[in-house]
């Protein structure tokens, strides 16, 4: 089976840390079928003059990412001008790429409801093949509340052959937009269990130069208000005077990084902002912490929560998106309302000192790997084609393509030079997407 994946939330050489959850799931999916990725980049006249857009526009047209052949077609985008046109413009921009894409795919998958999913449905209908739309969180929780976008978003979801949601809560959100529940599959993200596993906290702290005698709370993700980065600092400021042996570390970067730095300055060396880090360093910080803190205002199913539980670390988070599905037991962590700083500060205080068994956390959480996640995703794609779930033993699956491994001969374009292959060493942690 040939699958074409279309999404703007995917890494490229200029932005290697974007959406690593898609990168890992799609790479694992290649064990079951042939995959090509259109990792699209928004473009508009004069985009190169704006720093926000110029970096991505410098991305190569083609590259190999974890063995997957990836194209980066540009699509015409009108930021804040006419958002209701972005779906049709996206689909129109893909027509040229699709015309060059031979042979035609058997299924088109759009990852993110709008405009990606909308465009995938348009192109699939042109080809007469099934369309699958994967939804992540803000595409349903936020975009569906925008009057200019909602009609096109609903149209795409309702005409999709199947919809894949990363949490039960998102499934209900998709159903509320008019999609029957029997056409919606819940496929949760996986975790790299070779990297995120219980490790000795003392050894991790020693490797990071942290004191073994202090308590450590950790935030991992984009430094954004909606992700709760500023809430984490504000809540820590509330608890800090009463708990002088507790520190807070924030791993990541983002649009509100300067605001986070300004807030952290009031707390001296008790708050550390590390900036972006490679994936293995993120895993080490998770191993070093007493608990993860993620006070997001809205979410899908954040991978950093899954990674922390797989590492045997408890979590303090907000009752949004798919987080309650993951923190299914009080033993795994504590949930508070988004924006409730007093409740967040109290929960963080408790989490800093609560004793727990990391191995029990792992057992209770039951986190699955990326192979299991990809297989569930593939079963949803098979269902879109009217086929039964696959029953192939794991030993008969093809190996996951490695970064420097050439793609199979069935791929539809040659890999670019090695100098344009994806720099694995610069990857951000999954939780930073």
Image (cartoon, rainbow, N blue to C red):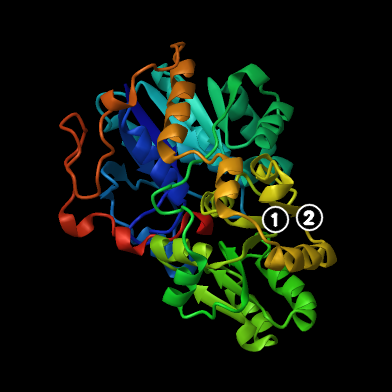
Q: Residue sitting at 16 percent across and 41 percent down?
A: 414
How far across and how far down the image is residue 236, in percent?
Answer: 73, 74
First in residue order: circle 2 vs circle 1: 1
User: Can residue 3 be seen at all in this image of the molecule?
Assistant: yes
Which disc number belongs to residue 191? none
Is label 2 in contact with label 1 (beta carbons under 8 Å)?
yes
Q: Which residue does the numbered mark 2 point to in the structure image?
A: 336
Can you give x and y, in whole percent of width and height, for residue 115 in the image? 54, 40
Secondary structure found at label 2: strand
Q: Nearer the viewer, residue 77 or 154?
A: 154
Percent coordinates x, y for residue 202 in the rendering? 50, 71
Question: Residue tagged by mark 1?
Answer: 317
The quarter of the picture where the N terminus appears is top left
Q: Is residue 172 left or right of residue 238?
A: left
Q: Is residue 305 left or right of residue 242?
A: left
Residue sitting at 70 percent across and 67 percent down? 353
Any part of residue 180 in sight = no
Alpha carbon of mark 2 to alpha carbon of mark 1: how far? 6 Å
């Amino acid at each position: 089976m040939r699958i074409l994946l279309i999404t703007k939330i995917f890494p490229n050489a200029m932005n290697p840390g974007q959406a690593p959850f898609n990168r890992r799931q799609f790479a694992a999916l290649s064990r079951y079928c042939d995959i090509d990725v259109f990792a699209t980049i928004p473009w508009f006249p004069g985009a190169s003059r704006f720093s926000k857009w110029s970096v991505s526009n410098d991305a190569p047209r083609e590259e190999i990412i974890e063995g997957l052949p990836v194209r980066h077609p540009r699509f015409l985008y009108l930021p804040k001008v006419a958002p209701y046109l972005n779906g049709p413009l996206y689909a129109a921009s893909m027509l040229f790429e699709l015309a060059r894409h031979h042979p035609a795919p058997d299924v088109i998958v759009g990852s993110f409801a709008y405009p990606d999913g909308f465009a995938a449905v348009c192109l699939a209908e042109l080809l007469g093949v099934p369309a699958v739309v994967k939804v992540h969180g803000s595409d349903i929780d936020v975009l569906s509340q925008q009057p200019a976008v909602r009609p096109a978003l609903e149209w795409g979801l309702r005409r999709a052959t199947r919809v894949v949601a990363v949490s039960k809560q998102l499934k209900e959100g998709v159903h509320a937009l008019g999609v029957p529940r029997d056409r919606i599959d819940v496929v949760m993200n996986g975790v790299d269990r070779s990297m995120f596993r219980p490790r000795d906290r003392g050894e991790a702290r020693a490797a990071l130069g942290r004191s073994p005698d202090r308590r450590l709370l950790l935030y991992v993700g984009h430094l954004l208000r909606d992700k709760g980065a500023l809430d984490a600092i504000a809540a820590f400021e509330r608890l800090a005077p009463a708990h002088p042996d507790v520190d807070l570390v924030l791993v990541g970067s983002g649009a509100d990084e300067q605001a986070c730095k300004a807030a952290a300055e009031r707390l001296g060396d008790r708050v550390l902002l590390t900036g972006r880090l490679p994936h293995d360093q993120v895993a080490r910080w998770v191993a070093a912490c007493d608990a993860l803190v993620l006070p997001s205002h809205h979410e899908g199913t954040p991978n950093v929560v899954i990674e922390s539980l797989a590492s045997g670390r408890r979590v303090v988070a907000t009752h949004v998106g798919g987080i309650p599905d993951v923190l299914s037991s009080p033993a795994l962590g504590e949930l508070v309302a988004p924006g409730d700083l007093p409740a967040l500060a109290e929960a963080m205080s408790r989490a800093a000192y609560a004793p727990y068994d990391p191995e029990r956390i792992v057992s209770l959480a039951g986190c699955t790997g990326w192979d299991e996640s990809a297989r569930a995703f593939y079963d949803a794609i098979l269902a879109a084609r009217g086929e039964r779930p696959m029953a192939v033993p794991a030993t008969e699956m093809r190996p996951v393509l490695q970064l420097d491994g050439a793609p199979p001969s069935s791929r539809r374009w040659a890999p670019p030079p090695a100098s344009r292959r994806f720099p694995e060493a610069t990857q951000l942690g999954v939780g930073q997407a």
